[in-house]
Amino acid sequence: MVRTLRGDRVALDVDGATTTVAQAKGMVMALERVPVAMQRLFFAGCHLDDDDRTLAGYGVQHESVLFLGLRLRAADTTPCQYVPVALSRITSN
């Protein structure tokens, strides 16, 4: 079961022992039209970030609920660069 961005619950037909995170994301894409690259799945407060790991490897069991979140920049994996900027002092009247 996946809780979607709208708060709906969508049932997934999976076998937790053999279904990988990547396969679950593929099912979510088919049902919710959210590209796999933009999906972030969570279970029990843990981000399921290893696509090759099985759902059971994260402790997901029958009747468990996964939560769907969005990755804001799916295509850009370049880390942000910090550039110091001088700020002028702000005064209030």
Image (spheres, rainbow, N blue to C red):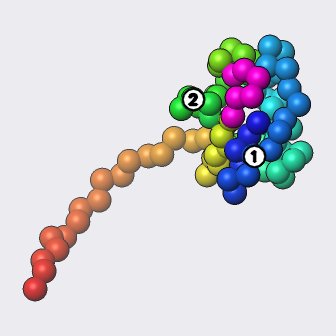
Residue closer to the observer: 35 or 2: 2
Residue that badge 1 annotates: 9
Question: Quick check: can you spot residue 76?
Answer: no
Quarter occupied by the N terminus: top right
Q: Residue furthest bottom?
A: 93
Specify whether residue 17 is in view. yes
The image position of residue 90, as x and y in percent, is 17, 74
In the image, residue 71 lies in the stretch drawn in magenta: no
Q: Is disc 1 placed on a helix, strand or loop?
A: strand
Q: In this view, which residue lies farthest toward the front?
A: 63
Q: Residue 50 or 45: which is nearer the viewer?
A: 45
Q: Which residue is mark 2?
A: 44
Q: Percent x, y for residue 92?
A: 13, 80
Q: Main secondary structure of the magenta part?
A: loop
The segment highlighted magenta reads 60-65
Label 1: few (<14), some (14–19) or many (≥20) C-alpha neighbours in 10 Å: some
Which residue type does callout 2 highlight?
Ala
Q: Quadrant of residue 21?
A: top right
Earlier-in-chain disc, 2 versus 1:
1
Badge 2: residue crowd in 10 Å (few <14, some 14–19, many ≥20): few
Q: Please provide percent x and percent y for residue 86.
A: 24, 62
Q: Residue at x 23, y 65 (%)?
A: 87
Name the residue: 79% across, 19% down: 16
Q: Is residue 44 shown above or below 71? A: above
